[in-house]
Amino acid sequence: MLKDPKALGAWTPARPRFLRGRQWALLSSAFLLLKPGGSLVYATCALDGAENDGVARRLPEKYGDDAILDPPGFSEGEATEFGRIILPDRDGGRGPMYVARFRKRGPAGIAAHT
């Protein structure tokens, strides 16, 4: 965004709020379609914590024990409440990238791995 004057010029303070709403709709819809025991990755290129953990937090708030936090299987970046974030200034120029992973509770309350 910083390298593209057109993209930077289109940014407004309302944009992150709009994106959070869209991201939540996508995440929630994907979770509803996920089969029991299935895994779901939520990833963004956002720096805003409200677009990252803020959206991820809503999954267990809405779906309760059916949404099981399943931490990403890598150690790069730094841990957040629900996932990991890779930041360019701390991770050799990589990122920004946020990743959170959830598993949908399987039959009889078992968090099956698929």
Image (spheres, rainbow, N blue to C red):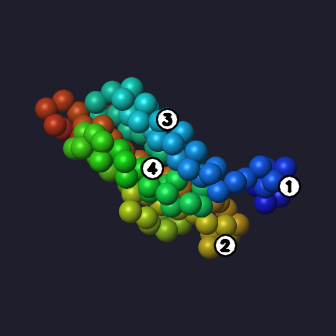
Question: In whole angstroms, how far apart are the C-alphas of marks 4 and 1?
Answer: 28 Å
Question: How far across and down, in percent of the image, does residue 51 sit?
Answer: 52, 53
Looking at the image, is mark 4 or mark 2 earlier in the sequence? 4
**Viewer can see residue 89:** yes
Write the residue at 39% across / 57% down: 82
Give the mark nearer the N terminus: 4 vs 1: 1
- The image quadrant that residue 73 belongs to is bottom left
Q: Residue furthest bottom?
A: 90
Mark 4 to mark 2: distance in Å? Answer: 24 Å
Q: Name the residue under label 4.
A: 55
Query: Of marks 4 and 3, which one's residue comes earlier in the chain?
Result: 3
- Kind of element beneath mark 4: helix
Residue assigned mark 2: 89
Left or right: residue 14 compared with residue 105: right
- Going by the numbered disc 1, the residue's amino acid type is Pro
Q: Quadrant of the N terminus?
A: bottom right
Q: Is mark 3 on a helix, strand or loop?
A: helix
Observer-nearest of 16 and 43: 16
Q: What element carries label 2?
A: loop
Q: Name the residue under label 1.
A: 5
Q: Which of 6 and 100 is in front in this view?
A: 6
Q: What residue type is labelled 4?
A: Val
Q: Name the disc covering residue 26, or none.
A: 3
